[in-house]
Amino acid sequence: MNEKKVLLVTGASSDIGIKIIGEVYENYDTIWAHYNHESEALKHLKEKCGEKLELIQADFSSVDSVKSMITVITESGKFPDHIIHLSAPKFRIQKFVKESEDAFRKDYTVSVDSIISILRALVPRMVKNKNGKIIFALSANTIGMPAKFQSSYTVSKYALLGLMKSLAVEYADKNITVNAVSPDMVNTKFLSEIPELIVQQAADNSPLKRNLDVEEVAPVFKFLLSDDGNRITGENISITGGSF
């Protein structure tokens, strides 16, 4: 990467977000690190990265909160050149008929509506600069058939997949790349509401006989942010350890 740039990471307090920022912060003048709830890990990362890490709070289930975050960013003049969208409600297991309509709406609002609003506000600056990179964190559920009992989660991830593909086509001639990363189950606090039996079954069903670690996922985001990823767009990159 030849120039210092500005990065926005939504869901930066996640284990993957912390790892990515820790790996790439030296490449940026400013990193907007979005979070909903306070995180000790994010505070420690702030100590490492210093003033270049701008912590910004927003509840993505609230339209007004998302708008307020966008206003802070745009009024600062520090428009992101690169955006990573990690935000999602905590992963859970639930049968379709028992999943509430409110749960479907919340998943969609947090995962999809939020980034649509953010990109509508920030992409025009990327177009003006003829430079930008956007990366969505999806799921192995978008590769082949999804796992059972994850309907609201899967619906939101497929919506993001459609958004990614559409934006990649629309902005390919503007030097803006739009991609997605779809890992299999990763050992993070995102799984805290999943029964241990389900987590272990996922590990047993993997050719690796274990779930993925954050260290195996973050490098793909780092690559897509780098100049080496400049000619990759519209791709949903799977990280499954050999599962198909």
Image (tube, rainbow, N blue to C red):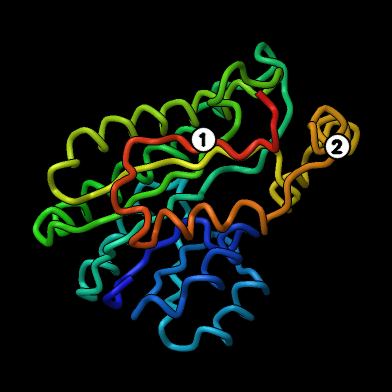
Q: Residues within 10 Å of mark 1 (few under 14, many from 20)?
A: many
Lower position in the chain sequence, tag 1 or tag 2: 1
Q: Residue at image x 83%, y 36%?
A: 203
x and y percent of residue 164 in the render?
A: 34, 35
- Image quarter where the N terminus lies is bottom left
- Image quarter where the C terminus lies is top right
Q: Decide: is 208 above or below 6.
A: above
Q: Which residue is mark 1?
A: 106
Q: Nearer the viewer, residue 226 or 62?
A: 226
Q: Which mark is residue 129?
A: none
Q: Nearer the viewer, residue 9 or 180?
A: 180
Q: Nearer the viewer, residue 102 or 57?
A: 57
- Left or right position of 95 against 4: right
Q: Quadrant of residue 76?
A: bottom left
Secondary structure found at label 2: loop
- Left or right position of 40 against 8: right
Q: Residue at image x 37%, y 58%?
A: 228
x and y percent of residue 45 in the render?
A: 59, 78
Secondary structure found at label 1: helix
